[in-house]
Image: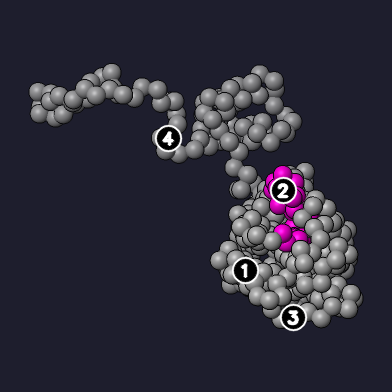
Amino acid sequence: MDLRIPVADRTGHRTVPETTRRTDRIPGTRYGNRPTMKDVAARAGVGLKTVSRVVNGEPGVTPETERRVQEAIDALGFRRNDSARVLRKGRTASIGLVLEDLADPFYGPLSRAVEEVARAHGALLINGSSAEDADREQELVLALCARRVDGLVVIPAGDDHRYLEPEIKAGVATVFVDRPAGHIDADVVVSDNYGGAHDGVSHLIAHGHRRIGFIGDMPRIHTAAERLRGYRTAMEDAGITVADSWMSLGVTDPERVRRAAEEMLSGPDPVTAIFTGNNRVTVTVIRVLAGHARRVALVGFDDIELADLLQPGVTVVAQDAAALGRTAAERLFRQLDGTLLAPERIELPTRLITRGSGELPPAD
């Protein structure tokens, strides 16, 4: 950086020493604007059509002319305007992915899997988060449609998706994942939430537990309701009457979950085991149990990072987030290819991973 102070010339105007003036600007380019094919043509001394042929890999250009055009492209830093190109074709070569929460670790593998499938089909993926808000979901979905995405993969926050009917009829391929759509027929890819929860609770029962608590997400959410149903059915199948105080559903805020866990663990007949409804709930309950004098069994729905390194390791019902994303994206591109007919519900299995916490016997 040159810190010399500008001096005044004989006319009284302040001037900058010659050594501080910019002299490296490329001739023929416009400062502050991206170079265009017109700039490339001017530098290479060819017509616009010739530049277009080189950029798009079309025949009809001699090797020497192609070399001059490529040198101009490299010198100017030209990049093809794909947005204009696809608009002329009437397609955007992009798909939208609407998630619940971009910060949730569960959605990382799911999003990555969708992106890999999109990339294999030459499409760009645009992510957005509804923050579990139905209005925000609709706003985001329609904004993506307005930008003419070819398709949508949606993890729904709302339970009424009739607003999407005009877009689907207009040709926007749509697949719902993790939760089904509301009031419309559409492809959906989900995990076996009911079966997974039933397996997890049955596992606790098989290890001698009868007083088993359930802490889950908001009951209006499809996955939370299905996991609660699995818990209830497993308890009923074992002939166990569930006390109201053993169940707590609501937001996954740590303070709410902490209070629920502490209430279940207190009183004359505390629970001896807890089944948690998702990864965020599981993490909070682990913290509560770490400060609890009595050993309490735990099985969580969704795997969590470092679950195998804790003492004891955390037993979980794992769903394959990457398989959910990959299956949904592949289904989407089959819609775009015109090879699918009627909407279908695809349910992927879960897997019980035993690590120690779910195998602890009742303390009393």
Q: Mark 2 or 4 closer to N-term?
A: 4
Q: Residues within 10 Å of mark 2 (few under 14, many from 20)?
A: few
Q: Mark 1 or 3 closer to N-term?
A: 3
> Looking at the rendered structure, which numbered label has been put on residue 345?
none
Report if residue 314 lies within the magenta region: yes
Magenta part of the chain: 295-321
Local secondary structure at mark 4: loop
Q: Nearer the viewer, residue 292 or 123?
A: 292
Q: Mark 4 or 3 closer to N-term?
A: 4
Tell me which residue sits at (27%, 22%) in the image: 2
Give the vertical position of 38 relative to 263 (above or below). Answer: above
Give the vertical position of 36 relative to 8 (above or below). Answer: below
Under mark 1, the amino acid is: Glu
* Label 2 close to label 4 by CB (< 8 Å): no
Secondary structure predominantly adopted by residues drawn in magenta: loop
Does residue 313 appear left or right of residue 262 in this picture? right
Local secondary structure at mark 2: loop
Residue that mark 2 sits on: 311
- Marks 1 and 3, how far apart in space? 16 Å
Does residue 7 appear left or right of residue 92 in this picture? left
Residue that mark 1 sits on: 262
Under mark 3, the amino acid is: Ala
- Marks 1 and 4, how far apart in space? 66 Å
